[in-house]
Image (cartoon, helix red, strand yellow):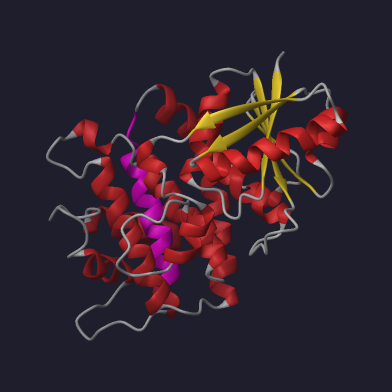
Amino acid sequence: MKSSVYAGSFDPWTYGHQFVLDSALEVFDCVHVVSAINPAKQSLLKPEVRARVIAHSIDPFSDWWALDPPFHIGDRVIVTSQEGLVADYAKENAIEHLIRGLRSTSDFEAEFNLYFSNQAINPKIQTWAIMCPPRLLHCSSTYVKTVVGKPHVKSVGSKFVAQALMLNWVRVLGQIFDLIEVCSTHRFDIDNSNLNESDLSECLQLLFSSLVHRIVRISRSVMVKTSKLLDAFLKQNGFRLREEIKDKKHYPKNEVNQLWGILSYCIEQDAIFPSDVDSGVAYILSLAKNLGKTSVKLFNEEEVIFAYESLRK
């Protein structure tokens, strides 16, 4: 098995990092994604937290916060954190290939120097550089840190869990948003008059930022209850949904309604509603009314209310 190491600060993991990983998996049988410490950068998130964010970004159907690294995602990806030299990690794991992503000539100069540094430590190590596509040239961790939480930004470039942690908000709500997005991947396939994937992502991003600014504090008791509901959801549905969405291209409408119900329950406890809104479900729809490029609703209100009432039983 030919393995490689893709290491970086990943603070946070972005869609650009995901592209590099996906490209590396086309060449290597296994990729070790290592959240490392860069002394030249001041990180917002600790290495182990970043490793969990990476694992979740790749596979949101498992609760990586309940596990300890290294995280094995299927048979081909291992995610962990490392405080020492990446070259030493590669040597300890009998790996001779490093993966690096390039976005600009300045990146090349830095990687060129790093290549010779790694060669001095371990002459067997070779570096594979993957060029970033034009659509992701802007998508750096610096960009994400600059725009995260801004109410008018339609694409931040990282998963909602990463955004929630960077904003010191509620991680479990980020998990719910990420699950809604990935479970809705094939929503457009069922009805081409419905929200397409791009429209939905845009709507979810704007809704997430709106909630962050309107509900600054979620009480601990609500967080605990919401975490239990999400944990039960993942244990019951996680493995099956992963396979159905990836392999069968299925849109799990009932499960998506359950996720909206869990989100509605959470925000309902600590939100201050306008006078004409009487539930978390109605509140979400009122915020989402003018989001995105389409007038299609994010969900059917009656179906989500039914899912919400089922959760309370």
Residue at the extreme bottom of the image, as rendered: 275
- Which residue is depicted at the point 51% across and 26% down? 23
- The answer to whether any part of residue 139 appears in the image is yes
Left or right, residue 40 beside residue 284: right
Name the quarter where the C terminus is drawn: bottom left
Tell me the magenta residue range: 250-267
Left or right, residue 62 beside residue 160: right
Q: Quadrant of residue 208?
A: bottom left
Name the quarter where the N terminus is drawn: top right
Left or right, residue 288 beside residue 129: left
Q: Is 212 above or below relative to 38?
A: below
- Where does residue 252 sit, x and y in percent of width and height? 35, 37
Kindly report the secondary structure that dominates the magenta region of the rendered protein. Answer: helix
Check if residue 145 falls in the magenta segment: no
- Where does residue 125 sit, x and y in percent of width and height? 77, 25
- Which residue is depicted at the point 57% across and 23% down? 25
- Where does residue 68 sit, x and y in percent of width and height? 76, 46
Nearest to the observer: residue 210 or residue 134: 134
- The answer to whether any part of residue 59 appears in the image is no
- Which residue is depicted at the point 75% across and 39% down? 70
Q: Is 189 above or below relative to 203?
A: above
- Where does residue 96 sit, x and y in percent of width and height? 77, 22
